[in-house]
Image (cartoon, helix red, strand yellow):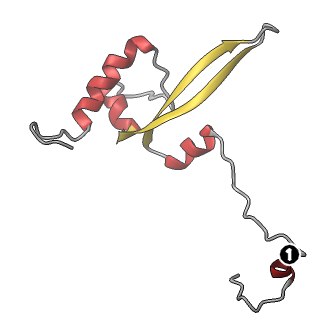
């Protein structure tokens, strides 16, 4: 609701604080489930707490420029396709090779 300078409502008088829309916080799992076939890269690290508890921390890295099914086909999956794929740092060259095929290339000699 927009208020005019001559408005004397509770908000304009300062008697009532304007309501601030609540931000919906979603988990990584919720965001991934919404994107269906999109491929998303998430970094998962494990940390050992002083108490001996092992926790996983997940951080969104980026959306990939291809469908997840395309990436699985690239890796040779024909059936029994996993819903998610865990890759170690050793597998990153394979991911980079896949991305090099999918990302648009900039013409040489152009300054961006």
Quadrant in the rendering for residue 5: bottom right
Judge by depth and name the residue closer to the eye, 8 or 65: 8
Judge by depth and name the residue closer to the eye, 61 or 31: 61
The residue under the point 45% across, 37% down is 62
- Count of marks placed on residues: 1
The residue under the point 63% across, 15% down is 46
Name, please, the residue furthest toward the front: 5
Judge by depth and name the residue closer to the eye, 17 or 6: 6
Q: Position of residue 24 (x, y in %)?
A: 69, 53
The residue under the point 12% across, 40% down is 107
Q: Quadrant of the C terminus?
A: top left
Q: Which residue is disc 1 drawn over?
A: 14
Q: Position of residue 45 (x, y in %)?
A: 59, 19
Q: Position of residue 40 (x, y in %)?
A: 46, 37
The residue under the point 78% across, 90% down is 7
Mark 1, residues whose alpha carbon is within 10 Å: few (<14), some, or many (≥20)? few
Judge by depth and name the residue closer to the eye, 38 or 12: 12
């Amino acid at each position: 609701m927009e208020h005019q300078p001559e408005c004397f409502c509770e908000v304009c008088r300062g008697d009532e604080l304007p309501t601030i829309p609540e931000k919906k916080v979603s988990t990584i799992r919720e965001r991934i489930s919404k994107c269906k076939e999109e491929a998303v890269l998430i970094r998962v690290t494990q940390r050992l707490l002083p108490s001996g508890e092992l926790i996983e921390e997940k951080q969104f890295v980026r959306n990939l420029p291809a469908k997840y099914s395309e990436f699985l086909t690239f890796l040779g999956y024909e059936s029994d396709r996993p819903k998610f794929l865990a890759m170690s740092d050793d597998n990153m060259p394979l991911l980079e090779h896949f991305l090099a095929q999918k990302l648009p290339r900039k013409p040489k000699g152009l300054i961006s």
